[in-house]
Image (cartoon, grey):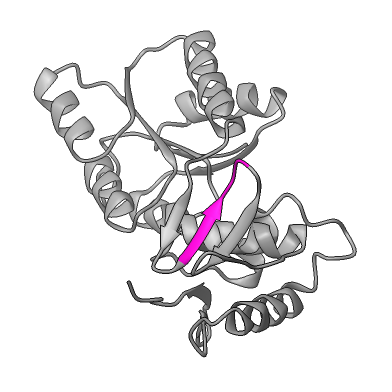
Amino acid sequence: MRILILEDDPRIHHPLAEDLRRQHHAVDVVEDGATGLDFALTGVHDVVLLDILLPGVDGLEICRRLRYAKSSAFILMITSREDVRDKVRALDWGADDYLVKPFDLAELSARIRAVARRHREAPETVLRGPLRLDPSCRTVTYDDAPVPLTATEYTILATLMYNPLQVFSRAMLREKISTFDESERDSVKTHITNLRRKLRGAGGVEDPIENVYGIGYRLADLGE
């Protein structure tokens, strides 16, 4: 998994990042809140380990902004604050878990493994207007009519459907979508073009995948 550590104390984030990389996770470390928020909003991270007391933008505000943006990342707060009110605020604002410093690396690793197990489980069927994606059998339908997609097209569409407000650049899709083989990594635009054509052919709107100029792609409003 790809993990983002937002922590300004190198005595904490250095050994933590080293331990997670030994477990074969991809790890990014950011020490200030404003830069960390930009990193987190890219949508490429599966887990965000988030300190509350950060310079610039505090961790609670980052948590709130991520959930407002419909981020599906698992957010685990790591903080020296033991006040139950801070824990309640973090959970109310969208955090999934809370760990008080000093914490044991083994305990944190166990929680990360639990997240990994949940990621391996099939997510729920998602419906965006007449478009339906069923991960249990990897099928897509539009107004109940099947839309045949390649494995890569399906993965791109699933990424967009599960994150309907998120704009994904081509680079973000290459990072996020693990099903791309090396021959496909530079052909995101071609897959998007083919996906648009198939969705239009099934009766969808003229531009089912919006091109946000200079940024990337997101799912269009497909109606009810």
Q: Quadrant of residue 183?
A: bottom right
For residue 46: magenta?
no
The image shows residue 14, relative to residue 99, as above or below, that is below
Residue 45 in view of the camera: yes
Rendered residue at 46%/24% (across/down): 12
Q: Residue furthest front?
A: 144
Q: Which of the pair 123/111 is nearer the observer?
A: 123
The image shows residue 141, relative to residue 23, as above or below, that is below
For residue 135: magenta?
yes
Q: Quadrant of the C terminus?
A: bottom left
Rendered residue at 72%/79% (across/down): 194
Q: Which of the pair 105/164 is nearer the observer?
A: 164
Q: Quadrant of residue 172?
A: bottom right
| Residue extent of the magenta highlight | 131-136
Rendered residue at 77%/63% (across/down): 150
* Place of residue 97 in the rendered image (x, y in percent of width and height, measured from the top left): 33, 25
* Place of residue 47 in the rendered image (x, y in percent of width and height, measured from the top left): 49, 37
Residue 56 in view of the camera: no
Q: Quadrant of residue 70?
A: bottom left
Q: Quadrant of the N terminus?
A: top right
